[in-house]
Image: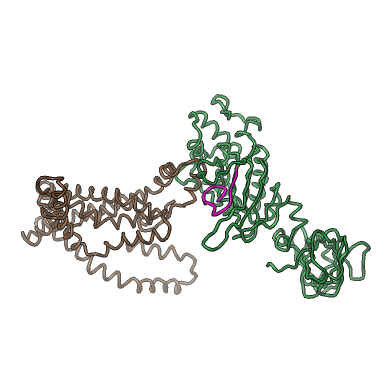
Chain colours: A brown, B green
Amino acid sequence: MASELSLSIRSGRPALPAAGSKARPFILQAILLAPVFGWVTAFFLVPIGLMIWRSFAEAGLAPYVTILTSPVYLKVLITTLKICLLTTLGCLALGYPIAYVLTVARPTVRGVVLILVILPYWLDYIVRSYSWMILLGRRGLVNQLALSLGLSERPLSLLYTLFSVSIGMIQILLPLMILTLFGAMLRIDRHLLDAAAIHGASRWRAFRTVFLPLSLPGVYAAGLLVFVSALGFYITPALLGGPEQTMISQTIMVLASDLLNWPLASAAGVLLLVVTTVLLALYNRFFSLDRMFGGVTT
Amino acid sequence: MSVVAASDRGRPRSESEAPVARAGVRVRLERLTKFFGRVRAVDEVSLEIPSGSFVTLLGPSGSGKTTALNLIAGFLAPDAGEIQFDGRAISALPPHKRNIGMVFQSYALFPHMTVFENVAYPLRMRDRLSRDAMRARVAETLQLAQLSGLEARYPRQLSGGQQQRVSMARALVSGPRLLLMDEPLGALDKRLREQLQIEIKQIHRQIGSTFVYVTHDQSEALTMSDLIVVMHHGRIVQIGSPPEVYEAPVNAFVADFLGGANLLSGQMVSRRSDACEVRIANGQVIAVPRGGLAETESAAVSIFIRPEDIRILPPEQRPHGLMGTPATIRDVVYLGEALKVAAVVGDQTVSVRTLRSEVDRLAPGREVFLAWAPQSSRLLPAADDR
């Protein structure tokens, strides 16, 4: 990152005549970037370095071998990926239509829907997770409704299942999915839909042949963002999931604070970091990352 | 509709076989009105567009010409009035059922499709053609648009001119009887624009569809149109052939918009059946053919003369049969093919186009006599609308 930065500084100023004046913008930029750089170094790079060092320090590769071979940890890894995938697909299924409506709606409708999308985002996700417990518990709202309507004989066990974890995480990550998709969809030229319509495409076919394919980069970006965010979830699976739905963050927590097995906890953390980095790198290879946050689509 | 057999494609075919020659749509707008908020973007526009004609909606930005086009296309629904194709009301028909081809200002090519796929799109949506027939039709249209060989390219790999041609080809491929063009050449440089004007005109002659063309470029309108519809503030100001609107504008706005007209303001001093006399700012009294103007005596009027109709003579020369006024030269600008001279008459500036060879005679500050044939001047209502 640092080398990229200095590269862009140099290539951005190709035609400066004197060496003295060349130094000045660099110093200025260095001063402006210093606080952020210091912050990131002290509170992000150093701790990560410590974590990586700690994972190897005591027993070399042994903690990694344990995690990748022991059925317990492997199961946690697979569960984590499964929950994240479900969450991502759920967010996509619910979020795509909403983002599309936002894109084509009149400004007033768009404002209202946007507020409805963003409002829950401001609510703390612990609160949101607890409210799902109220809804889904044995004596929760859903069960009482089902019993009183005679839809079910006994209370359904909705809580502490894959379903409850996924639905809680979907609800928390949905705004992220919608806003990312919306940003990507806004960049699709609306004249293209006019062009499709005037040349014979019904609304549905115009959507299928023009809008949908052009929105796919946005779908990949939003999907990746949601998936990566879901990887590190801790509170929601802890509150809404059972032992079967233990995710990797919970395992790290248990290893570090209950079992005090720091090398193993660190190794698990490093693995999580590696998976995330690989995903982002893959994405960057095929799509380029800046598009995720508002680069150009076409 | 005749479909070209797959076996005989490849060689250029005769013009009559080019994408479907049928009679163009007769378009009729009746008191068409569209509001944007409180603004009347299109204000009771009534217009009859003959079958197979090339009609240009000409006007400055905000004149309602693009809105009118979007109403014809069906992207917008009119607030009042009616649109008819061949006498049939089509206001309720969605765009995809109107059977129109359209070229957009931004081209609106599908960025995720190749040139071939872009041009094949209307066929895929509209016609049930066999694979081979579709290929043949696309190849034929690409040839007409001089795009052969670029089939596999994506729009972003094409120059502006090529993108424009793809956009044309896509609009033409399914042989629509009505073609809408929204400032299709606006983004191109002058040379390419002039070349494509000629090509579009040729295509129009070849396929016989009705063309409705929107532009703010008067020279484009004059070059290409059978009929020019001059629009201003959402209304039609004048409808006429290019010579009609250029030589006989109905008011100062049309006169000025169609290529820098001179409008000498003055006061009517006498009024006969065939001609009027007008006193202009420097006291000179000038005779002007009366035309259809109904202004009364002593009314404020404008005399309209095109810069190329004025001759610059020495101050003492008063040629018989010509009208004119003394003037002082203020500026001489070299244009290449001609000279543009600004001369001061009273408190007004008159623009004159003259031959390059006159450059030695003309210098700022020199006294001259501006002369013109009376029949090249016209009387217009006072120029207040600017």
Establish if B102 lies above or below A238: above
Closer to the camera in the image, B122 or B333: B122
Residue A2 in the image: state x and y as whole percent. Answer: 32, 64
Residue A132 in the image: state x and y as whole percent. Answer: 18, 57
Residue at (77% x, 56% y) in the render: B248
Q: Is residue B253 magenta?
A: no
Q: Is residue B299 left or right of residue A196?
A: right
Q: Residue furthest right?
A: B320
Residue A243 in the image: state x and y as whole percent. Answer: 9, 51
On the question of residue A76 being in view, the answer is no
Q: Residue furthest front?
A: A149
Closer to the camera in the image, B83 or B120: B83
Q: Is residue B78 magenta?
A: yes
Q: Residue furthest top?
A: B7
Q: Is residue A282 left or right of residue A9?
A: left
Residue at (9% x, 48% y) in the render: A72
Establish if A277 lies above or below B202: below
- Quarter holding the N terminus of chain A? bottom left
Q: Is residue A85 left or right of residue B293?
A: left
Magenta-tinted stretch: B71-84
On the question of residue B372 being in view, the answer is yes
Establish if B36 lies above or below A22: above
Establish if B54 lies above or below B133: below
Q: Residue furthest left?
A: A259
Residue B251 in the image: state x and y as whole percent. Answer: 73, 62
Residue at (48% x, 36% y) in the render: B124
Total numbered circles: 0
